[in-house]
Amino acid sequence: MKLLIDNCISTVVATLLVARGYDVEHVADWPSDPGDRRILAHAVRSGRVVITADGDFGQLVVFERLASAGVIILDQEITPAEQPDACVRALETHGPTCWPEVS
């Protein structure tokens, strides 16, 4: 599965997911944060599921009906130390159901 990790998610998450075999790109590696709309558009073009704690992505996908390859929104109350386990749980629990062709 191809993933795009948003800036609000710890870089530790990207490292862990790469070690688990995921194809990961992290917005923190980009020269600057282009904003949610451009992040989402890039994810669509590259076929990546966005992992974020920013609820604005839900607004863009659900209410504005912008295209997406998928979005996983972590609870904002999850600490950076808890994010790696939360991401792995979300992907293992929901990945095969939500993205069976890419899991």
Image (tube, grey):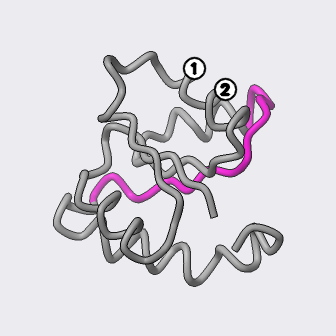
What's the CA distance linking mark 1 and mark 2?
Answer: 5 Å
Please give left or right for residue 13 compared with residue 103 in the image. left
Q: Secondary structure at mark 1?
A: helix
- Which residue is identified by label 1? 38
Identify the image quadrant of the N terminus: bottom right
Picture coordinates of residue 63 (x, y %)? 74, 32
Please give left or right for residue 70 compared with residue 91 in the image. right
Q: Secondary structure at mark 2?
A: helix
Marks 1 & 2, CB-CB < 8 Å contact: yes
Which residue shows up at 42% across the image and 69% down it?
87
Classify residue 32 by image quadrant. top left
Picture coordinates of residue 75 (x, y %)? 39, 58
Residue type at mark 1: give it.
Arg
User: Does the magenta portion include 69?
Assistant: yes
Q: Residues within 10 Å of mark 2 (few under 14, many from 20)?
A: some
Which residue shows up at 62% across the image and 51% down it?
49
Say if 18 sits above or below 92 in the image: above
Magenta stretch, main secondary structure class: loop
Which residue shows up at 32% across the image and 70% down it?
16
Please give left or right for residue 10 compared with residue 20 in the image. left
Q: How many numbered marks, from 0 up?
A: 2
Picture coordinates of residue 13 (x, y %)? 31, 61
- Which residue is identified by label 2? 41
- Looking at the picture, tell me which residue is in the foreground, 62 or 46: 46
Which residue shows up at 72% across the image and 79% down it?
96
Identify the image quadrant of the C terminus: bottom right
Picture coordinates of residue 45 (x, y %)? 72, 32
Segment tinted magenta in the rendering: 62-77
Q: Residues within 10 Å of mark 1 (few under 14, many from 20)?
A: few
Residue type at mark 2: give it.
Ala
Say if 102 sits above or below 4 in the image: below
